[in-house]
Amino acid sequence: MEEIEQRNNNGLKEGVISAIPVIIGYFPVAMAFGLLAKTVNVSLLDSFLFSLLVFAGASQFMALDLIKAGIATGDIIIATLLLNLRHIMMSASLSVRLKESKKKWLLFIAFGITDETFAVASLKKGPLTRAFLLALQGLSYIAWVSGSVVGYLVGAVLPMTLQSSLGIGLYAMFAAILTPEIRKSLNVLILSIISGLIYFIIYYFHLLPSGWDLIGTIILSSGIGLMVLKDEEEVI
């Protein structure tokens, strides 16, 4: 029992630390979402509920574009569903590494999976704990929801140059997550390059319908990673 409690305490601490780059990236991007929601005449309450209930940046931005274009509600739901199908694969990947988790927590953990929290969790060595995932995802969730509200309320008073640069925070966050792992693992570097090339080819040549380019990239790059790249031996 003491061993499990100690593992949970360590997982909580690791989760908080691992959430820091995600928080730094999420808050300005969420502000950009709140600002954009205001420009397309989405109310503050709806913007808040958008982030509170959906918690999926790419699909939220896409939904705003579709709302602005006057697309029917049913079509918006289907489009965002297709875009978020990748979360099923992410959930399956993390579930096999999740140890000592009661079923009542699985709903919260599944809801908290995003591209960024998945990237952080998948790069963590060893089994995953409930405490680690809840800390990582919970703090990221708070940053996203609060950033959306702040962006809606104060985003319009920011200088235009600052408004246009808010979205860059997402790319900076991915760089902060990947760079330390790339320095430790050649496999991570190779797979990152392969994934980028696959996405570029699919997106540039319109090989898949809109919304499926990212899903296709995840499937292909994951398959290549499993078939081609071998596990690196850990240096102790």
Image: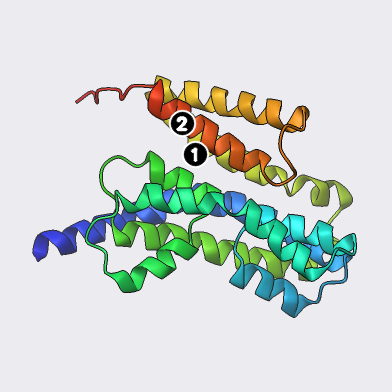
Dot 2: element: helix
Dot 1: element: helix
The residue beneath circle 2 is 223
Task: Kindly identify the amino acid type of the residue bearing the numbered disc 2.
Answer: Gly
At x 35%, y 42%, the residue is 124
Mark 1 or mark 2, earlier in chain: 1
Q: Quadrant of the N terminus?
A: bottom left
Q: Quadrant of residue 57?
A: bottom right
Task: Report x, y in % for residue 58.
Answer: 67, 52
Is 179 above or below relative to 42?
Answer: above
Is 165 above or below relative to 197?
Answer: below
Is 126 above or below relative to 15?
Answer: above
Residue 177 — which label? Answer: 1
Task: Report x, y in % for residue 140.
Answer: 52, 59
Crowding at label 2, few (<14), some or many (≥20) Cα neighbours within 10 Å? Answer: few
Of marks 1 and 2, the one in the foreground? 2
Task: Kindly identify the amino acid type of the residue bearing the numbered disc 1.
Answer: Ile
Residue 127 — which label? Answer: none
Task: Report x, y in % for residue 87.
Answer: 52, 53
**Relative to 36, is 60 on the left or the right?**
left
**Relative to 122, is 83 on the left or the right?**
right
Task: Report x, y in % for residue 108.
Answer: 43, 68
Q: Quadrant of residue 54?
A: bottom right
